[in-house]
Image: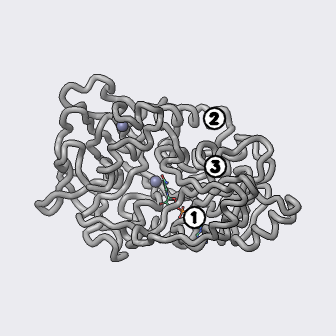
């Protein structure tokens, strides 16, 4: 079928997304076609335009999405036409050693996430007579997608589409970076560095896990203020200001959990972030650096002497088929804010404006809404 999508023909050059006609193949075995209603503008897609992420093929972006299953591939029985679904960026196979040990976010299928191919090694999306690679087996910057059934989590019909879309990535990633990776416990002092789409959910996760003090760090003043609505108790414009504040609040003990969710992580943040971390505390990094950055500097001697930990977090350690229904239940009970995370919605044609707004700090999350 023919549809429209937003492509990067020259990834890494900041030339933006081109919205144009795509040819989409029918679903094959283990796949379905989904008609999306909404797609979130995550910073992770933007990295491939900005050059922080590197791919060597034309990319159909987008991995946060929500919509309705409209066509089943041969033999698909676990989904039905009409099912409402959220897309997840890791289609865990349920069979590899990681999946079998309850760590489906680390599934071996991760190796193919940014290869642009479907699981069988071919492409479902074509433009200008050639193959196009889809972001993380999805490509939600197109209203119509063909993806593995394993990429989808079914939801009820009571969740607004934009809220559902961001529950595909920003929400479980941020929440999980606080709860699973940093391991926030009752009474903890927590610092979240970067309160955008992902970080605001780390604030929400920390609050729900019982943190007593949550410091939101962001250079954008209105985001620092809004972070209080999501559970922050204090805010700071940068890490230096946060360090002074936390030293004062804790009489020098510092924060049990420090969470890094800024848009582009620089290796230079690690040492000051460790200074913010209490003895025996955890520095959890969920934001990513430019792929070309291979070094982070920190002082090893005090790191060893204070038994601090540095942990990376993929998808916030979330097992999506478990985490997403749980998060949506919290939303239904009013304990997790989703609608308030969606600052503005855009049409597909406005995608470059949406990302400009993200860059300029105008959005917690921008979301594409399809007709
Ligand atoms: N680990 C994962 O599985 C995973 C999943 C999704 C996104 N991510 C990554 O998480 C990061 C955040 O994504 P997002 O969509 O929330 O981005 P975003 O652009 O919405 O938010 C980033 C925030 O960081 C703030 N910021 C920038 N520089 C800062 C600094 N020096 N100190 C403090 N704050 C700063 C910005 O003002 C913004 O509010 C990105 O690197 C993204 O690729 C990782
Ligand atoms: Zn994302
Ligand atoms: Zn697996």
Specify whether residue 301 is in view: yes
Position of residue 162 measured from the top left corner of the image (x, y, whole percent): 49, 47
Q: Residue at label 3?
A: 182
Secondary structure of residue under mark 3:
loop
Is the Cβ of the residue at disc 3 closer than 8 Å to that at disc 2?
A: no
Of the residues under marks 3 and 2, which one precedes in the sequence? Answer: 3
Q: How busy is the neighbourhood of tag 2: few (under 14 within 10 Å), some, or many (20 plus)? A: some
Which numbered disc, 1 or 3, marks the residue closer to the eye? 3
Q: Residue furthest left?
A: 129
Residue 104: image quadrant is top left
Q: In the shown orientation, is residue 162 left or right of residue 87?
A: right
Labels in figure, total: 3
Between the residue at mark 1 and the residue at mark 3, the CA separation in whole angstroms equals 16 Å
Q: How busy is the neighbourhood of tag 1: few (under 14 within 10 Å), some, or many (20 plus)? A: many
Query: Mark 1: is the Cβ under 8 angstroms from ligand 1?
Result: yes
Residue 330, numbered label: 2
Residues 156 and 313: in front is 313
Secondary structure of residue under mark 1:
loop
Residue 34: image quadrant is top left
Q: How is the image coloured?
A: one colour
Q: Residue at label 1?
A: 262
Q: Residue at x 65, y 44 (%)?
A: 183
Q: In the shown orientation, is residue 153 left or right of residue 284?
A: left
Position of residue 146 measured from the top left corner of the image (x, y, whole percent): 26, 43
Residues 257 and 300: in front is 300
Q: Quadrant of ligand 1?
A: bottom right
Of the residues under marks 1 and 3, which one precedes in the sequence? Answer: 3
Q: Residue at x 71, y 41 (%)?
A: 209
Between the residue at mark 3 and the residue at mark 2, the CA separation in whole angstroms equals 20 Å
Q: In the shown orientation, is residue 26 left or right of residue 356?
A: left
């Amino acid at each position: 079928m023919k549809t429209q999508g937003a492509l990067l023909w020259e990834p890494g050059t900041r030339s933006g997304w081109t919205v144009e006609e795509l040819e989409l193949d029918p679903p094959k075995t283990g796949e379905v076609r989904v008609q999306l209603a909404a797609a979130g503008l995550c910073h992770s897609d933007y990295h491939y335009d900005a050059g922080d992420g590197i791919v060597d093929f034309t990319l159909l972006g987008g991995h946060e999405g929500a919509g309705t299953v409209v066509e089943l591939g041969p033999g698909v029985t676990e989904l039905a036409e009409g099912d409402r679904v959220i897309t997840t960026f890791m289609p865990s196979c349920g069979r590899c050693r990681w999946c079998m040990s309850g760590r489906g976010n680390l599934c071996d299928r991760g190796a193919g996430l940014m290869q642009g191919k479907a699981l069988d090694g071919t492409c479902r999306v074509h433009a200008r007579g050639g193959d196009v690679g889809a972001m993380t087996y999805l490509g939600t910057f197109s209203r119509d997608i063909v993806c593995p059934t394993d990429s989808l989590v079914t939801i009820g019909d009571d969740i607004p589409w934009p809220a559902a879309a961001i529950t595909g990535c920003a929400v479980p990633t941020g929440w999980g970076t606080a709860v699973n990776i940093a391991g926030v416990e009752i009474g903890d002092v927590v610092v979240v560095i970067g309160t955008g789409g992902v970080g605001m959910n780390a604030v929400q996760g920390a609050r729900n896990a019982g943190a007593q003090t949550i410091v939101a760090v962001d250079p954008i003043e209105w985001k620092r203020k809004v972070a209080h609505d999501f559970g922050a108790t204090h805010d700071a414009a940068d890490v230096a200001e946060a360090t002074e504040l936390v030293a004062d609040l804790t009489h020098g003990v510092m924060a049990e959990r420090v969470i890094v969710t800024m848009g582009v992580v620089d290796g230079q943040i690690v040492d000051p972030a460790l200074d913010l971390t209490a003895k025996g505390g955890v520095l959890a990094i969920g934001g990513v650096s430019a792929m070309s950055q291979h070094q982070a500097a920190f002082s090893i001697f005090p790191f060893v002497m204070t038994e601090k930990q540095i942990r990376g977090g993929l998808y916030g350690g979330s097992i999506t088929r478990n985490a997403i229904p749980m998060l949506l239940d919290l939303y239904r009970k009013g304990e997790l804010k989703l609608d308030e995370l969606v600052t503005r919605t855009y049409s597909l044609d406005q995608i470059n404006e949406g990302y400009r707004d993200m860059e300029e700090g105008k959005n917690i999350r921008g979301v594409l809404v399809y007709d």
